[in-house]
């Protein structure tokens, strides 16, 4: 006798729907937090900044999961346009600098004001925010966010003065990462997401990619995102 499936829809679709619902609830929570912060007397408690940061971090992670699901089912394509690389860096700084300052961590930037890149700025900004957040967790006192032209690529780079990437998250022989092992304890989901997004950016026969190494000028981890 045939059995009736317990789930009438596939689990990935169910998971994506749940993530979307959680994202909506999180948005409501962030609005409530903003209202509470507005009526809180000065000086505002540092816990408000921490709550805002964690809420934004969760929102970014949920957005990444939804984006990866849409890519997997061929329902997504990036919105590629011309942007100033410096504007993307400024957006990342605006989202990350407050919490880094609370931890006495310097967030430094380097970028030519006229440097242009062709990308989906929202996706790239989200990816960089996640990786700057990771760098903040493992660095000692400073994180450098930079962008420059290298041949046919615009390269976004994040460097810190921490202990560096673990072996499982390093590029083989300083070459681009082809895939990331998500079965390890330190999953590198932010790297996985950024790697997928990088590959969606293409110009002619060139495609975006990422590299990781422990050759930061500060002695720690160095991440590079290459966009053609």
Image (cartoon, grey):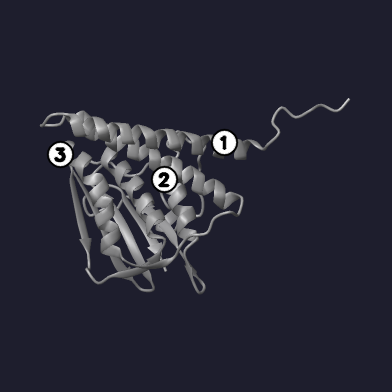
Compare residues 106 and 162 and report the one nearer the observer: 106
Residue drawn where x is 28% and y is 37% of the image = 53
Q: State the residue position of label 1.
A: 15
17 up-or-down from 218: above or below: above
Name the outermost residue toward the right. 1
User: Label 2 to label 1, Cα distance in Å?
Assistant: 19 Å
- Crowdedness near tag 3: few (<14), some (14–19) or many (≥20) residues, C-alpha within 10 Å: few
Which residue is at a point 20% across and 42% down the rendered structure image?
A: 98
Q: For residue 104, which numbered disc appears in the image?
A: 3
Residue for badge 2: 190
Calculate the distance from the C-alpha at mark 1 to the C-alpha at mark 3.
Answer: 38 Å
SS type, badge 2 = helix
Q: Residue at x 39, y 73 (%)?
A: 152
Residue 73 horizontal/vertical position (percent)? 61, 50
The residue at the point 35 percent across, 68 percent down is 117
Position above or below: 163 against 209: above
Image quarter of the C terminus: bottom left
- The x and y percentages for residue 69 are 55, 46
Mark 2 residue crowding within 10 angstroms, few (<14) / some (14–19) / many (20+) = some
Q: Earlier in the sequence, mark 2 or mark 1?
A: 1
* Left-right relation of 29 to 159: right
- Do we see residue 89 in this rendering? yes
Q: Earlier in the sequence, mark 1 or mark 3?
A: 1
Total residue callouts: 3
Kindly state the secondary structure of the residue where label 3 is placed.
loop
- CA gap, disc 2 and disc 3: 24 Å
Answer whether labels 2 and 3 touch (C-beta < 8 Å): no
């Amino acid at each position: 006798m045939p059995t009736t499936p317990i789930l009438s829809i596939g689990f990935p679709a169910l998971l994506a729907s749940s993530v979307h619902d959680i994202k909506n609830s999180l948005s409501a929570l962030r609005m409530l937090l903003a209202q509470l912060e507005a009526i809180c007397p000065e000086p505002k408690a540092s816990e408000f900044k921490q709550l805002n940061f964690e809420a934004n971090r969760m929102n970014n992670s949920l957005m990444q999961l939804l984006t990866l699901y849409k890519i997997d089912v061929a329902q997504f394509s990036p919105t590629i346009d011309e942007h100033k690389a410096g504007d993307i860096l400024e957006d990342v700084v605006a989202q990350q600098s407050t919490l880094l300052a609370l931890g006495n961590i310097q967030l430094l930037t380097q970028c030519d004001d006229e440097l242009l890149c062709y990308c989906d700025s929202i996706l790239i900004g989200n990816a960089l925010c996640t990786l700057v957040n990771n760098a903040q967790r493992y660095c000692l006192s400073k994180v450098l966010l930079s962008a420059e032209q290298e041949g046919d690529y615009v390269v976004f780079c994040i460097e810190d003065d921490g202990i560096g990437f673990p072996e499982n998250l390093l590029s083989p022989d300083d070459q681009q990462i082809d895939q990331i092992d998500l079965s390890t304890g330190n999953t590198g989901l932010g790297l996985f997401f950024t790697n997928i997004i990088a590959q969606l950016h293409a110009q002619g026969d060139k495609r975006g990619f990422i590299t990781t190494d422990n050759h930061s000028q500060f002695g720690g981890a160095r991440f590079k995102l290459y966009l053609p």
